[in-house]
Image (cartoon, rainbow, N blue to C red):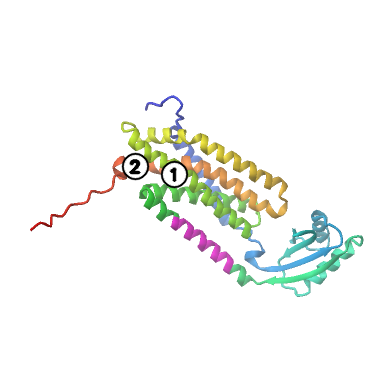
Amino acid sequence: MNIKIGTINFMGVRNVAFAGTLILTLIALGSWFTKGINFGLDFTGGTLIELTYQQPAELGKVRQELVKAGYAEAVVQSFGDTKDVLVRMPSEDPELGKKVAAALQAADTGNPASLKRVEYVGPQVGEELRDQGGLGMLMALGGILLYVGFRFQWKFALGAILSLIHDTVIVMGVLSFFQITFDLTVLAAVLAVVGYSLNDTIVIFDRVRENFRVLRKASLVENINISTSQTLLRTMATSISTLLAIAALLFFGGDNLFGFSIALFVGVLAGTYSSIYIANVVLIWLKLSSEDLIPPATKEVDDRP
């Protein structure tokens, strides 16, 4: 195979890349089915307690005080103002809010906390949210399948869907392996990863389709290598700038955005990789050809008497 100057032979290592992909996917699925997903209170139900302090509250200190009081599973986050704190924990005790407020008041008399509101989210509501979130993801993948199949061709659509499924499995596997809390914000991050990865894949697919008209004598593997190399600068610029923004959220966003940032960071890396070594490889497996992109000829009907 002749490789033009400036063209990277991405597909030359596709078998090695596929083996690595298979191993990572199996590890992710293994963690998913053994450890499970650490669903947050949005999905499992629990008690939400809003507290107000006289002075700005230190979330780390509040968390330590709750652990000492026996509430190790409490999730602490700021809520609007720096003096407002939101505490989430799995419990059905109607007096829990008063107990938590009393424990924090006793721990820090210099900056006492007052109870503002207590809400209970039942497990049935959380289960409905979980089911609706999963259904929404399936509907998104189905819509993507129809869109890519209509815009390009069914072989492109299959490659895009397998790439997106890979990205979702890898993200969920990382969340499961490290037992990062999966709540509504993390679900939003997973859906954002699906859209990001699809955008990368569509850019490469569009160039592959164009090069079928330009590189008439090139093989499919040469076409994919050239097309991927031509879009590489655009892909790298987009990925690196996105990762830098996510890294800022990861390091400075606090505990509230940690799961969201991790899901996005892993998803962007997986999406960039899968656009090259999954979506493109599927096209090779399915033996995409220029004939696949030619619309079928319509027969003219002679209606003359």
Q: Magenta segment, which residues?
A: 128-143
- Closer to the chain start, of discs 2 and 1, is 1
Q: Percent from the top left, x then y, of residue 40? A: 65, 61
Q: Which mark is residue 279?
A: 1
Prevailing secondary structure of the magenta residues? helix
Is residue 85 depicted above or below 245 in this figure?
A: below
**Tag 2–tag 1 contact (CB < 8 Å):** no
Amino acid type, mark 2: Leu
**Mark 2 — residue?**
288
Q: Percent from the top left, x then y, of residue 161? A: 44, 51
Is residue 226 depicted above or below 279 in this figure?
A: above
The image quarter containing residue 12 is: top left
Separation of residues labelled 2 and 1 (CA atoms): 12 Å
Amino acid type, mark 1: Ala
The image quarter containing residue 127 is: bottom right
- Mark 2 residue crowding within 10 angstroms, few (<14) / some (14–19) / many (20+): some
Q: Count the marks: how many?
A: 2
As rendered, which of 34 and 244 lies closer to the eye? Answer: 244
Q: Residue at x 61, y 50 (%)?
A: 263
Q: Percent from the top left, x then y, of residue 178? A: 65, 51
Is residue 201 depicted above or below 37 in this figure?
A: above
